[in-house]
Image: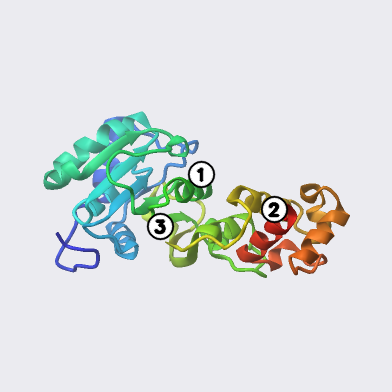
Amino acid sequence: MPHAGDPARISPTLGAGEIRALAARLGLRPTKGWGQNFVIDANTVHKIVRAAQVGSDDHVIEVGPGLGSLTLALLPRVGRVTAIEIDPVLAGELPHTVARHAPESADRLELVHADALQVTELAGPPPTALVANLPYNVSVPVVLSFLERFESIERVLVMVQLEVAERLAATPGSKIYGVPSVKAAWYAQVRLADRVGRNVFWPAPKVDSGLVEMRRRPAPVTTASRKDVFACIDAAFAQRRKTLRAALAGWAGSAQHAEQVLRAAGVDPQLRGERLGIQDFAVIAAARSA
């Protein structure tokens, strides 16, 4: 079976006309509530698959497969795709779409009709990658929850709103660095892999998109739990204009105790949260419980 990047393999996908015709046959009107914007450009679909660097040994999770363009492109390249779809009409149609366009790969598809944020376990071998065009309204919670629940996921390649992509990949000191940036860094090395224009979607969103690549790495070394570290991060950014001494007062019990914890962690209490990396927050959380 070919691996990602094999130029000889042209995966099936759906053209713009086919997507609109399929939606019309299903009586489908994309809903804002579920963040439905379908990719109608085959080149973009193949770009996602190439960037994901997945191959025959991978079990890929796809959240929000929609009408199936990305699913069709993934199936010939990977060992298994588990597609998680909340829309009952789309969930019911996807296996038929795969059977029509890629019958030789149909047995590699597992369809889960569910809210992805409620999924805590999956059938089959442990998933190794998350590859998806994510609904804008749940993109960060989906990414963080799957990295938390499925430690076997080694790689993530997702298309999200460009602003969200830039925030996830932001580094300390940046104006857009915040809670998503720090929490994502707990799990992985994150980078903005590419930018995507709005015209590759139907309906076209009002904003551009970005491809975010994540490579899992070991969690920071700390005696604090992930829950405690994340609580510290949330407190530090809840009022990001405040110094850490003031911002962490509630979390630590008082401003005075916050200052003591920060000094024990080797962090200047007058700094703001946006100056710290994930390892800094891990040390601060450990200092509070010491």
* In this picture, residue 149 sits left or right of residue 185: left
**For this rendering, which residue is in front, 231 or 86?**
231
From where the camera sits, is residue 228 visible? yes
Q: What residue would you read off at disc 2?
A: 232
Coordinates of residue 129 in the picture (x, y in percent): 35, 54
Q: CA distance from mark 3 to mark 1?
A: 15 Å
Q: Amino acid at mark 2?
A: Cys
Packing grade of label 1 (10 A; few <14, some 14-19, many >=20) is some
Q: Is label 1 or label 2 in front?
A: 2
Residue 156 badge: 3
Coordinates of residue 124 in the picture (x, y in percent): 27, 42
Residue at 30% across, 38% down: 123
Which callout, 2 or 3, points at the residue further toward the start of the chain?
3
**For this rendering, which residue is in front, 211 or 109?**
109
Q: Quadrant of the C terminus?
A: bottom right
Which callout, 1 or 2, points at the residue further toward the start of the chain?
1
Q: How many marks?
A: 3
Q: Is label 3 or label 1 in front?
A: 3
Q: What residue would you read off at disc 1?
A: 138
Q: Amino acid at mark 1?
A: Val
